[in-house]
Amino acid sequence: MGLFGFEKETLLDLTVNAIPLGILLFFIAAFAVVSPFGLDPVFSGLQFSLMISMFLLLAVLTYYAGRAVEDAEQAEEAAEIAESDAKAESLEDGTETTDDEAEPEGDDELPEA
């Protein structure tokens, strides 16, 4: 298990959202340190609330996207395991035929011209 319970491949898929999160975090910190537009409580509060809400929404969306990717990968792995188990059982029972044993479907007769 990797960071936040995600596997390495899922974390690599989610790094796409790391750049926008970093940019938002940079601007939140930059505007907190340097106030280029003055210190009006209403406008500064609105500015910070917009930036912080976008940061939080993107972080939550990234987390749930990671969960969805993990669940899909686990379901795919479970389906592959179930398919291989079913193949193994049919081979043990002798019910599965190979391509060599299959009967032709009438391809050997060609229509006369």
Image (spheres, rainbow, N blue to C red):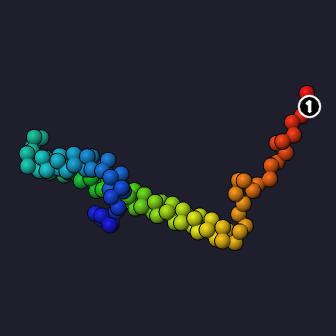
Q: Which is nearer the eye, 25 or 86?
A: 86
What residue lies at 36% left-to-right and 51% top-to-bottom?
13
The answer to whether residue 1 is seen in the rendering is yes
Question: How many callouts does the rendering have?
Answer: 1
Dot 1 amino acid type: Glu
**Residue 17 horizontal side relative to residue 29, left or right:** right
What residue lies at 27% left-to-right and 50% top-to-bottom?
18
Q: Residues within 10 Å of mark 1 (few under 14, many from 20)?
A: few
The percent coordinates of residue 14 (x first, y second) are 33, 52
Q: Residue furthest front?
A: 100
The percent coordinates of residue 31 (x first, y second) are 13, 47
Q: Which is nearer the eye, 24 or 35?
A: 24
Where is 7 relative to 93, above or below?
above
The answer to whether residue 86 is seen in the rendering is no
Where is 66 relative to 20, above or below?
below
Q: Quadrant of the N terminus?
A: bottom left
The percent coordinates of residue 100 (x first, y second) are 72, 53
Q: Which is nearer the eye, 4 or 57?
A: 4
Identify the secondary structure beneath mark 1. loop
**Residue 37 horizontal side relative to residue 87, left or right:** left
- Can you tell which quarter of the image residue 8 is in? bottom left
Q: Residue furthest top?
A: 113
What residue lies at 67% left-to-right and 68% top-to-bottom?
90
What residue lies at 86% left-to-right and 36% top-to-bottom?
110
Q: Residue furthest right?
A: 112
Q: Quadrant of the C terminus?
A: top right
Which residue is under mark 1? 112
The percent coordinates of residue 87 (x first, y second) are 63, 65
